[in-house]
Every structure is written in structure tokens, then in C-alpha cells.
Amino acid sequence: PAPAAPAAAPAAAAGPAETCRAVTSASVGWGVKQSFRRYLTGPIAGGHWDLDGVGFSGDRGGRGTFDFTGDTAAATVSGGDADIPLRGAVTFTGHAGLLTIRLSALSLRIRGTQAQIVADYRTNTVSSFRPGADVTGADTGTQRPIASFTLDRPLDATAGGTVTLTGTGVLTDDGNTAFGGTYGPGNNEADPISVTPVSYTHLRAHETSLHL
């Protein structure tokens, strides 16, 4: 079983002598978890998802990705680290509304070859998913890492230009909570992530404010 992911890493900060870069474009494709999407849209849950500023491509119950656009005005790159807020939100609904999961304020955090998807989440808690069951409350998290990934390579700390990264990952403990508590160790494999591309331009060392 994969170990639990650590708490979300702090935002990247540029040292006084470090060359910084401004992100000019970034897109992230991530399907969350294929088996969850297949269950949600299948005959048992009879559900769907609603997208707010997010796209979807591929097979809803198979190979597919939610397609996020990076907020380049708030993105930062410093050395091999990057923090890229992602626009939009996704709401999953099933079992006639008893299952409701909302992910918002998402961001991608890269530290070398390790990455996390961080998000706010709100998930219904229910007595059961049988007809007539009650929503008993909600599990919530604010800026929690819901998935962690090992990337195929790190960001290049010296070269500017366009970078494409991919990686495999797992749902974290917070991700398991966000998706109803059924994806713990042994069943927590997440869909792979693709960051295509990260494009950036150099800033001079004294230009340390990366929030453009």
C-alpha cells in the first residue's frame, strides 16, 4: 500500500540569487479515478458531474480526463518548484443527490519530481445510499492535498521554455475522505496526471514578485 501523503507543501519561494520564471500557460489533465467515474455514471449510482470552467475529454467511464486551465496570473515557478492555481470546479452527484462531492480552488504543486493536487472539498455524509436515506452532514477540507504524484522528470531549474510532465499517483487520506472513504490504502490508485505544457519566461533575479 502507498504511504499517506504529507500535508500540502508550502508555496514556492525564490531565494535572493535564484532565477525566477513567470508562467505563461499551463493545462492539467487528470481523470481523478477511473473506477469512481465508472461507478458514478453507471446504473447503481446513476450519476453525473457538473463542470464549472473545466473541460472533459475521453470516455466518461474509461480513459478520460478533466481538463483544467492554469491561472497564469497567480502561478509561480522557482528553481524546480511550481505552484499553479487551476481555474474552475467539479461537482459529482449520484444516488439521487445523496452522493455529492464538490472540488474547488484546485491547484497543482510541484516540488522536484513530486506533485500534489490541492483542493477545497465538500462531501455529503449519509446514513446509506438506499432510497429514503438521509444526508447526515458533510466532510470538508480547505486547501488539502487530495492526490500525490511521482512525475517522470523534474522541472528544469535552468532552462526556460515549454515543459510537458506526466506522472502516476495515489489519492491521499484527504482524497479518500473527499471521495467517501472507500479509497484507502490498497485501493487508492489515482488516474495519471498530465501537465501539458508548462511554458514560462525568465525573470531577472531581483524581480522576485512572481504574482503577475
Image (cartoon, rainbow, N blue to C red):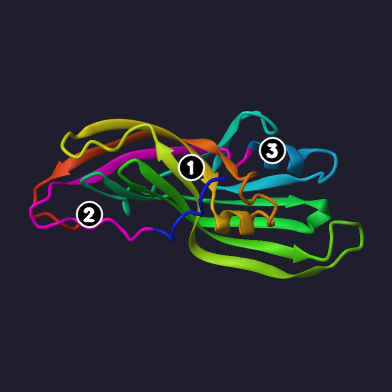
SS of the residue under disc 3 = helix
Measuring 50% from the left and 57% from the top, which residue is drawn there? 119
Q: Which residues are magenta?
A: 9-33
Asked whether residue 191 is drawn in magenta, I would say no
Looking at the image, which is closer to me, 171 or 123?
A: 171
Instruction: Tell me if mark 1 has few (under 14), some (14-19) or many (20+) residues whose alpha carbon lies within 10 angstroms of its own.
Output: many
**Is residue 37 depicted above or below 73 in this figure?**
above
Label 3 vs label 2, nearer the camera: 3
Please indicate whether residue 16 sits to the left or right of residue 62 in the image. Answer: left
Q: Secondary structure at mark 1?
A: strand
Q: Which residue was labeled with disc 1?
A: 68
Determine whether 38 is above or below 184 in the image.
above
- Please name the residue that numbered disc 2 is placed on: 210
x and y percent of residue 169 in the render?
A: 50, 41
What's the distance in space between the residues labelled 1 and 3, CA to CA?
20 Å
- The amino acid on which the numbered mark 2 sits, given as a three-letter code, is Leu
Q: Residue at x 32, y 54 (%)?
A: 74
Dot 1 amino acid type: Phe
